[in-house]
């Protein structure tokens, strides 16, 4: 299927008068997999090579680097993709039907949340008021959801948009991504200028209240 898509796309490209460069998502694993699904024709296209500074046509010699780049893509964006889960829960009126449910997003970070809440509110007011929600999506989040983070200065800086009551700092120990044994230094730097009461609330008060 992949080879057929690649070949068909490339045939179409050569028929168009403005000569665009066809694109097809490459496998995130070994580059040689791209050759097996028909990407070789795109890679060998002279116009393709001139269109990008990155020498894509040489990546089959850099399998390790390609895999590292794919992993970088995943870890850089996985927290932001949680908006899909949050929007699904809110949009399906789960929090409306079950007001006593509390949801904590573990290892989620929180710097992405202000935009996500604002966007959900906008979309709901603009064209999704038929979903059975009695409040704005952001209000459900503030009432029933929590997010955790390890090192997220953007989240701390925008805490008023997220809700000081809704974020919880975590060391994530003993996970390899934790900040131990430098947790105190991380917190001191990240919470510089934050009122002491809010710092206590975010670093342990909210968790104590949620988990009892």
Image (spheres, helix red, strand yellow):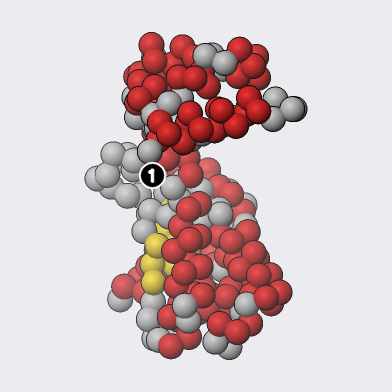
Q: Residue at x 44, y 64 (%)?
A: 85
Q: Is residue 11 above or below residue 163?
A: above
Q: Residue at x 48, y 61 (%)?
A: 84
- Residue 22 coordinates in the image, percent (x, y): 59, 30
- Residue 153 coordinates in the image, percent (x, y): 55, 47
Camera-nearest residue between 33 and 74 = 33
Number of other residues with Cα within 10 Å of mark 1, as a class: few under 14, some 14 to 19, many 20 or more: some
Q: Is residue 23 above or below residue 195?
A: above
Q: Quadrant of the C terminus?
A: bottom left
The reply to whether residue 128 is in sight is: yes
The reply to whether residue 166 is in sight is: no
Q: Is residue 63 above or below residue 143?
A: above
Q: Quadrant of residue 64?
A: top left
Camera-nearest residue between 172 and 25 = 25
Q: Quadrant of residue 112?
A: bottom right
Camera-nearest residue between 196 and 102 = 102
Q: Residue at x 51, y 48 (%)?
A: 152
Q: Residue at x 32, y 49 (%)?
A: 172
Q: Residue furthest right?
A: 18
- Residue 77 coordinates in the image, percent (x, y): 48, 44
Element type where label 1 sits in the image:
helix
Residue under label 1: 183
């Amino acid at each position: 299927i992949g080879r057929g898509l690649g070949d068909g796309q490339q045939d179409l490209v050569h028929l168009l008068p403005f000569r665009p460069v066809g694109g097809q998502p490459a496998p995130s694993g070994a580059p040689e997999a791209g050759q097996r699904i028909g990407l070789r024709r795109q890679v060998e296209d002279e116009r393709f090579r001139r269109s990008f500074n990155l020498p894509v046509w040489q990546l089959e010699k850099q399998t390790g680097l390609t895999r590292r780049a794919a992993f970088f893509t995943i870890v850089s964006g996985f927290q932001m993709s949680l908006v899909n889960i949050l929007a699904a829960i809110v949009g399906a009126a789960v929090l409306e039907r079950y007001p006593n449910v509390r949801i904590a997003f573990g290892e989620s970070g929180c710097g992405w949340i202000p935009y996500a809440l604002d966007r959900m509110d906008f979309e709901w007011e603009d064209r999704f008021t038929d979903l059975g929600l009695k409040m704005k999506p952001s209000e459900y989040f503030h009432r029933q959801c929590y997010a955790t983070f390890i090192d997220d200065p953007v989240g701390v800086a925008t805490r008023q948009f997220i809700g000081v009551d809704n974020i919880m700092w975590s060391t994530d120990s003993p996970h390899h991504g934790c900040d131990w044994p430098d947790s105190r230094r991380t917190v001191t730097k990240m919470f510089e200028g934050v009122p002491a009461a809010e710092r206590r609330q975010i670093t342990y008060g909210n968790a104590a209240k949620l988990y009892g």
